[in-house]
Image (spheres, rainbow, N blue to C red):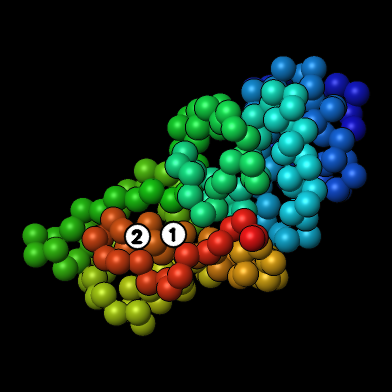
Amino acid sequence: MPKTIPPVDFLMVVGIHQDLLSELPEYLKDKKIKAVIIPIENPKWVPPGLQVQVLEDFERLGIQAAFPKPFCSLSKELNEYIKVGFNLTKNHDYIIEFIDYYKIGEPIVSFILSDDGKAILDTCVLQSAPCGSTFYILQQLKAKYIDDDELSLNERISKAHHSYPCNASMDKDLILKDSILHIGGILVRNAVRNELGLKEHEGRKMAYVAP
């Protein structure tokens, strides 16, 4: 660990060695950090047991923390991907402040549709995936007709997502029961479909916390 770090409100920790991660709470306890965000884009970065241990240490020391998996699942609302006690501290108002200020996390989008509601005339990203893929994906949907067919709208979103250099791994994650990259694709696809008033096309909800 470095002997000193510059004064910061938020610390983002990406892909550090697990031994260093386990010592991070103690290292930061006197650094006046508002919150720590530790995105998990690869299942090997943070095993679930270590995640819970480090989160408990942050909780004990009064440092807010989040372990979003993938980073684009970071949300102000608790859901199947963001759960207190597993990957989010009980107090997390500073995490919400971070999301509000930088407008990154779970994608939130908006559209201007044609008068008949059958075509996308323009798009707007209200909150982007941290990697920026939301902007790229929406550009690929602009001036396109909306066809609620799995091989059209869904395929268009999926193709755009896979064409962008997503940071997430294709390795299967034991908690998500899927690849982290695929979960990122589901999140942006559902953001688009929900804004268009279409039902989500993804079977059952993921059980993020293992029973």
| Rendering coords of residue 197 (x, y %) | 24, 61
Quadrant of image for the N terminus: top right
Task: From this view, report whether residue 199 is shown above or below residue 25.
Answer: below
Q: In this view of the protein, which residue sits in the foreground, 208 or 34?
A: 208
Query: Spatial distance from mark 2 to mark 1, Cα to Cα?
Result: 6 Å
Q: What residue is shown with label 1?
A: 188
Q: Is residue 144 left or right of residue 28?
A: left
Task: From this view, report whether residue 182 is shown above or below residue 208.
Answer: below
Task: From this view, report whether residue 45 is shown above or below residue 31.
Answer: below
Q: What secondary structure is found at the residue carrying circle 2?
A: helix
Residue at x 74% of width, y 47% of height: 51
Q: In this view of the protein, which residue sits in the foreground, 141 or 70?
A: 70
Q: Is residue 46 left or right of residue 148?
A: right
| Rendering coords of residue 106 (x, y %) | 47, 49
Quadrant of image for the C terminus: bottom right
Task: From this view, report whether residue 69 is shown above or below residue 96.
Answer: below
Q: Is residue 108 left or right of residue 147?
A: right
Q: Which mark is residue 192?
A: 2
**Is there CB contact under 8 Å for labels 2 and 1?**
yes
**Residue 6 visible in the snapshot:** no
Residue 30 occupies quadrant: top right
Q: In this view of the protein, which residue sits in the foreground, 201 or 120?
A: 201
**Residue 97 visible in the snapshot:** yes
